[in-house]
Image: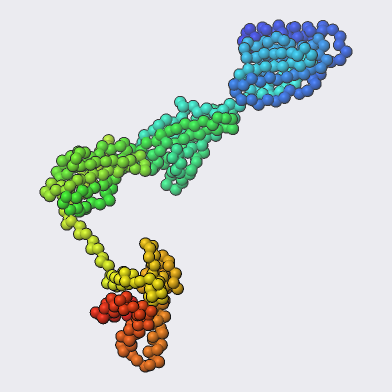
Amino acid sequence: MFSSLKSCSWTRKMAALVLLLWTHVAVTGGTVSEEPSFVEPIENVTIAAGRDVKLSCVVDNLGTYKVAWIAFDKSAILTVQDHVITRNPRVNVTHDGHRTWTLHLSRVNATDAGTYMCQVNTIVAKSQFGVLNVVVPPNIIDSESSGDVMVQESANITLTCSATGTPTPSITWRREDHLDININKTMQLREYNGAHLPLNKISRMDMAAYLCIARNGVPPIVSKRIQVSVDFPPMMSIPHQLVGAPLGYSITLECTIEAHPPALTYWTLGQGVMLHHGRKYHISERVGDVSYRTHMKLTIKSLRKNEDYGSYRCVAKNSRGETEGLIKLYETDPPTPAPTSPPSYLDKLFKDIHFKTNSISGKGEDDKLFGGHFEEGPDREYSAIGNQIEEEPDPFLIGGGEGGRTGSSHMEDRVRTEEESRLERGRTPDEEQGQYYTNMFNDSPAAAHPSSVWPLHLLLTVGLIQPLHLLL
């Protein structure tokens, strides 16, 4: 075995010396009653790079024989007994004074992974093996991966991401803004797996930061950010191309621009006079929901005739081209204020009735009017249910909640009673109309007090019977 070692000349000489010593000890080591034997196997170890590891070899009945540690994959002798043969400073060996020989490797790396052999130099050498696995977290190689890229719209590009690690890392692509990746016009994916990401017929919507993520189960997960920029000439949209406003008013004109690289923008009036931000004009810009979109606004204050009306242009320029949008501002008549609706005739009528009856009513049993009751107090209103005092709408108003429905129901009951009587007497509605209202008010307890009833008779006398008939 030792004749097949591949190392430097010094190592070969040392190995030859060790071999002579090894053979001499094996042959002349004295008589032993029992040959050495391994008590337990060498455990396989998996460890992350940069950590320290140890492999133990337990031998019984060693006698005068020797124990050596060998890197089997490299055919290199590491230690013999307590002596370190290799020149690797990270290798060491210890003995517990009895039967355990321990090989120490500090700060292991990927090159230390492999098979290690513990061997006893009997006439027929005895050996056992252990495997060291070194896992290495992923690492993205910048020199072999894509950097930030700038392309023109409709071009085809491929992003590349190269990573090392043990086990071999897997590569996943995502957009930083969490939108789908447009592989082509028919394929959109939230994630794309593979070291190469193709982007065909790229458009402004593909402009984003792409994340190359490498993972192999060994923390940490690493990523690289690649910015993809898509260049295109300015494009403009105008929501209102014809705008009217009256003299003395202020008006705001708007336009939206898409461009990359970002465009130089400004407003002009008439034959190209550039407008500047100041007391007369207020100019503002706001970035849209995507980085290549800009919203522009021009506010013109206190419009003046022969000065502020005309053609306004929203202009945008970048290295790929330029564009402009036209907005025409014309004069309009000032807006007329909307007429206010006066109170209806019936609302005013019943409000006056309610106010006057409250003003002339006295106290005691004689205060009853149409089955209701009035009391003093700022929040007291008439209730048509018994003699209770509740905060309800006027019972004479229709549709004012439950209170209004109760008052209306009371009047409807009176109408139904009179209608039945009229049918029994065979009179026409016109014949009964005047008698109906006369009876209704004369039957009321309030009729005993002429002072409290005459205002209502007076209102009815001057032609208010027909509106009441329509209301009921």
Vertical comparison of 343 with 277: above or below? below
Q: Is residue 131 visible?
A: yes
Answer with the quarter of the image where residue 267 lies: top left
Q: Is residue 397 visible?
A: no
Residue drawn 62% across and 12% down? 89
Percent across and percent down for residue 459 are 27, 77
Viewed as shown, does residue 50 lie left or right of 367?
A: right
Percent across and percent down for residue 13 are 66, 7
Q: Nearer the viewer, residue 163 or 56?
A: 56
Percent across and percent down for residue 214 are 52, 32
Viewed as shown, does residue 10 lie left or right of 267?
A: right
- Which residue is outermost to the bottom? 426
Residue drawn 79% across and 7% down? 25
Vertical comparison of 265 with 448: above or below? above
Percent across and percent down for residue 93 are 70, 13
Residue drawn 28% across and 38% down? 263
Vertical comparison of 247 with 64: above or below? below
Residue drawn 21% across and 53% down? 242
Answer with the quarter of the image where residue 155 lies: top left
Please state, as top left, top right, bottom left or bottom right, where the N terminus lies in the image. top right
Answer with the quarter of the image where residue 337 lies: bottom left
